Amino acid sequence: MDAVKKGRARKSTGREVRRLSRFAQRLLAEWKRLGLPTEHESVVVAVSGGADSMALLLGLNELSGVGRLALALTVAHLDHGLRAEAGALDARWVAEQSSALGCEVVLGSAAVKVRASETRDNLEQAARRARYEFLAAVAFERKARVVLAAHTLDDQAETVLLRLLRGSGAEGLSGIEPVRKLFEKNGVLLARPLLGWARRAETEAYCLERGVVPRVDAMNTDERYARVRVRRNLLPLMQTFNGRMVEALARTAQLLREDAAALELVAAELLCQASAEDVNKKSAPQQQILTPLRVDVLKGAPAALRRRALRQWIARGRGDLRRLEMTHLLAVEELLEGERGGRRIELPGGASVRRKRGLLYFDLKRVEKGDAAV
Amino acid sequence: MDAVKKGRARKSTGREVRRLSRFAQRLLAEWKRLGLPTEHESVVVAVSGGADSMALLLGLNELSGVGRLALALTVAHLDHGLRAEAGALDARWVAEQSSALGCEVVLGSAAVKVRASETRDNLEQAARRARYEFLAAVAFERKARVVLAAHTLDDQAETVLLRLLRGSGAEGLSGIEPVRKLFEKNGVLLARPLLGWARRAETEAYCLERGVVPRVDAMNTDERYARVRVRRNLLPLMQTFNGRMVEALARTAQLLREDAAALELVAAELLCQASAEDVNKKSAPQQQILTPLRVDVLKGAPAALRRRALRQWIARGRGDLRRLEMTHLLAVEELLEGERGGRRIELPGGASVRRKRGLLYFDLKRVEKGDAAV
């Protein structure tokens, strides 16, 4: 509470702004642009110990020191259990640094490899899921509304390229969101106040400026990872065409994110228009959890809206979109062609879509107790 | 007329299909998918003499030979005047090949360098404009509804990457359209029946299979051109990540083209909703060629739709979008912020947009006779 009082008592003056490092100034500007809280709150900072997350923590510390922010910072560090003793060393180092900066720290550990084999996620997905669950638990415990992650402009550019290499559409190429919900079903926000502006070189320089030598994760130089090859080979080649390539990719991501958001809005309207009374009710004994959709309305809509409306409908029916690929949507779209009903498309995870008398039905396989054990 | 009769008299049989080369089969499948005419018409084929356009011409010749197409083919070849004697040699070679295939040929020449300096276009833009005008003239003279260009899947991938290197949004990343109007104001279609499927290696192989050694344009290996560096350096590196990179980029282009088309439709609706009676008419003595737009309606719309609606409005006012950049749209968008009117944004080419009493006005500088000479 002392920090809060101090923060409110101090008035910001021009001299103070000049004393701030350039890094902290830009962090503060982005902080305000994103509408993040500046006082009376507890926030969680995800810190791996690398240059990006250490720069974020040091920047927040600098802004707190001059009273521009008055937040209770909790550092959260998860050992993913992927690098044996290196993981334990990183955890201890992060704990020491956090204490030196006067922050509380919560250390966690997860057996990501085990989780990955259990959930059929790849290692990267399993690690992310474990990390987000850990961050959500720390946020809950600290009553924090906001969790901070230190993704930079470079991360954004790399993500856009990785998605492009896979042949993504607008959603994929939108890259990383500056602010989103940590999980769909709780109110905690995941915010990335470095994403819109900070280059990796700037985070490294700022750490050194503050006398901190950040930890280096050996995975960051392991060329078996596509992300590392994008960083070390692809991006540098692209930079020979355009010296501001990273910024250009981030701009593309933002434009496509705005496009995707508008299309989702309009697709939701289309979904309303296409929703029909179930005229076949008697002949459909299976449990219908979703309103059926009118084939004629969907057929007349532009493909980009139709596919998004179908995706929203399926998401509502299944509760999520896991493992749903473009090929599944294209197969469902094919149900709209021709006049014939009676066909059925199976979706991953047991759901299916069928056409009958001018309507599309969503069916969910009823899971009996004990099925999961089979 | 002989060819037409022959084409109609023959019936296609299974054996005929088997006799067709794989290249001609795929060309025919795409031809039908695009809904291009198969008989009773004159079509113009743009032929540079390179592998792509020669393969297209040879494929059409093969399909005509077995009666699957019965079209009057006119070969159109433009010497851009950029490569001195090489240009004249290419023209003569194309004329010989066309005659050997029984096609009429129209040779043209343009002084692209002079045009570029006159119009402030760059060399590539000026060359394209000269080529399209030439093709339109040949189409007009031959009463052809369709002009064919031989762009391949590789051209599509290269175009998408060139646009990405510049930081484009969805429209730019949509790449090359399979079918579009040759010019906005006439009915001639520009169709690209190789764009959706043919790799450059396939056009080269098919030319050799038909005993034709295509011409090589020295510009295609000149690494001063970004397109050449994309082809020789960037795409091969990306292919080490994804062996079907060219196809993946083409897929991204198609998804984004569908997105952009849907957004343009919805933006047109927004433009209608935002169009206002001119309540300030008395105080606006300048000639108004466009309905003003309501600031409140635009402000409430998603950015992706608002910007496209503004672009459509400006296109309608100016007649085209030449030299209109995203920065101009962002500046016009800024007029929507705050409560103040009375500000004005200048657009390239003499038009401007100003805000007054809750409305946006489009003003076109009146060009007096003789102004152009100044």
Image: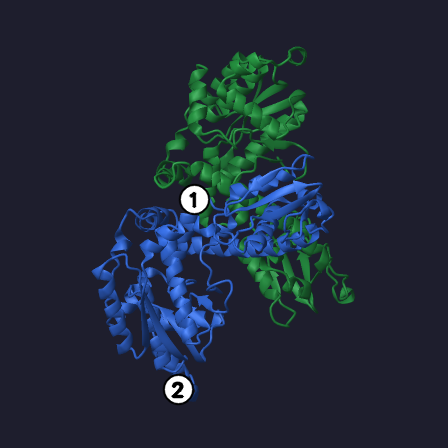
Chain colours: A blue, B green
Please state which of residues A306 and B277 is positioned toward the viewer in this rendering.
A306
Relative to residue A260, is residue B60 depicted above or below?
above
Alpha-carbon distance for marks 1 and 2? 49 Å
Residue type at mark 1: give it. Arg
Q: Position of residue A231 (x, y in %)?
A: 33, 51
Q: Position of residue A45 (x, y in %)?
A: 37, 70
Q: Which element is circle 2 on?
A: loop
Q: Residues within 10 Å of mark 2 (few under 14, many from 20)?
A: few
A37 with respect to A276 (left or right):
left
The answer to whether marks 1 and 2 mark residues whose Cβ atoms lie closer than 8 Å is no
Q: Which element is circle 1 on?
A: helix
Residue type at mark 2: give it. Met
* Residue labelled with disc 2: A1
Q: Residues within 10 Å of mark 1 (few under 14, many from 20)?
A: some
The residue that appears at 71% across and 41% down in the rendered structure is A357
B189 with respect to B221 (left or right):
right
The residue marked by circle 1 belongs to what chain? A
The part of the image, by quadrant, that contains residue A114 is bottom left
Q: Residue furthest front?
A: A370
Please state which of residues B319 and A180 is positioned toward the viewer in this rendering.
A180
* Residue labelled with disc 1: A166
Q: Earlier in the sequence, mark 1 or mark 2?
A: 2
Relative to residue B251, is residue A163 depicted above or below?
below
Q: Position of residue B119 (x, y in %)?
A: 55, 43
